[in-house]
Image (cartoon, rainbow, N blue to C red):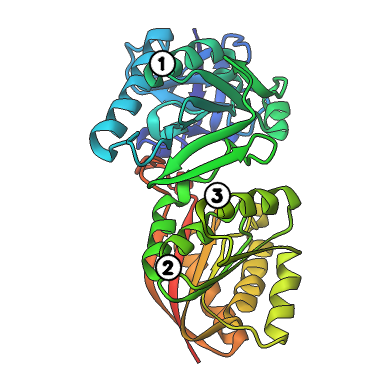
Amino acid sequence: MSTVRLRAGHVQPVWAGHPWVFAQAIESVDGAPAPGDVVTVVDPRGNFLGRGYWSPSSAIPVRIVTRDPGDPLDAASVGRRVEAAAAWRRAWLGLPSDETTGYRIVHGEGDGLPGVVADVYGETLSVQFTTIGAKRRQEEIVGHLVRVTGCRAVVETSSERVARLEGFEPHTGVLRGPDVASLEFRERGLALSIPLEVAQKTGYYFDQRDNRARIEDLARDRTVLDAFSYVGAFALFAARGGARRIVAIDSSPAAIATGAALAASAGYADRIEFVRADVRRALADMAAAGERFDVVVLDPPKLAPTVKDLEAGRKAYRRLNAAGLRLVRDGGLLVSCSCSAAMRQDDLQRTIGLAARDAGCHVAVLWVGQQAPDHPVLASFPEGRYLKCVVARVDR
């Protein structure tokens, strides 16, 4: 087994539990590991720090999987991690349940399986591999996931950019079992069906589950705008919560069509208006027309994908939040989300504060949400806490 030796001055984060070994932290590599091989990571004195998979073409050549020097990272080791992830979700989160059959069963580093993201949709498993080490072990990982979940079908949803970077061929489609046309599941009692061609990332945004529940609780007799709605999940739960009028806006015709079908199936078609439009332009047009809502939800895609994009991302979030704030009635609520890991919670709140000045109003934070607990994050790995959701009162 090859050994990766760290430079002096780069040991502390890894020693303290951070799972990523960056390229600039590596002093030398003893041996000639192939992409995806298991390597041992040591400090400059040769003290064991951990063991992980080798990704030579990545800016993160090693993601630590184990801190146990006796763990060989074999198939049995992977199986124990999958079993532990499933058992914890059953015992502490009650997942799956009769009410919720869609959830995340493996969340990368948070479940001790860097490079693996896996979601359960009823009887279908959706997996994504983001490192060559995980991809090389695809069969054993999928086998353990199927064994633990009992899923009949497995689909893979690769990111082409990540796959090319890591050095493997991207694949999107069925890996095992019968062909799958759609992902069928329930979220807190609401039946949902997402056509596979509409699915985003691993299919659907389970990370917003608790934040959707919050909006449902606040929605009775309110008017709600769901911007960047995708299939309208916030809109659907606002409707179930008793909102009297909801507008859901997204630029994707397929997502809008899917959302409209879901609303009709749930009996909410008369209260949710699905609009296909460029969201930023639509917000400006509605504000100019004098539209106002009790609740405005902003859930955009990543506006700051990496740290180098952060400054441009701050400006984009500021403009977007100012546009959303102009549509909130006096005393209403802005719900502002960011899935950009590079933007931290305090940064988002500060950006919303600046946006409030631009929009000529004041905001007071009432709640701060985050990704649902089936998306666990290592305490030593702040980059893993990517989702922020600020619920703020707007006063004019």
> Contact, CB < 8 Å: mark 1 with mark 3?
no
Q: Is residue 268 visible?
A: yes
Residue 386, placed above or below residue 74: below
Q: Which residue does the image show at 34% across and 44% down from the upper left?
A: 379
Label 1 sits on what residue type? Answer: Val
Name the residue located 41 percent from the left edge and 18 percent from the top edge.
150
Label whose residue precedes the other's in the sequence (1 or 3) = 1
> Which residue position holds label 2?
242
Question: Which residue bears the numbered disc 1?
Answer: 78
What is the x, y in percent for residue 86? Answer: 34, 26
Q: Mark 3 near mark 2, Cβ–Cβ under 8 Å? A: no
Q: In this view of the protein, which residue sits in the foreground, 130 or 256? A: 256
**Relative vertical location of residue 246 with respect to residue 182 in this rendering, above or below:** below
State how far apart marks 1 and 3 are (Cα).
Answer: 40 Å
Residue under the point 51% across and 52% down? 266
Local packing at callout 1 (Cα closer than 10 Å; few below 14, some 14-19, many 20+) is: some
Q: CA distance from mark 2 to mark 1?
A: 45 Å
What residue did someone put label 3 on? 265
Label annotation for residue 96: none
Distance between the alpha carbons at the discs numbered 3 and 2: 17 Å
User: Label 2 is placed on what type of residue?
Assistant: Gly
- Crowding at dot 2, Cα within 10 Å, few <14 / some 14-19 / many 20+, comes out as some
**Amino acid type at mark 3:** Ser
Which secondary structure, mark 2? loop
- Classed neighbour count for the residue bearing mark 3: other residues with Cα under 10 Å, few (<14), some (14–19), many (≥20): few
Q: Earlier in the sequence, mark 2 or mark 1?
A: 1
The answer to whether residue 129 is above or below residue 274 is above
Query: Quick one: SS at disc 3?
Result: helix
Judge from the rendering whether residue 50 lies leftward or rightward of residue 387; answer left or right: left
Secondary element at tag 1: helix
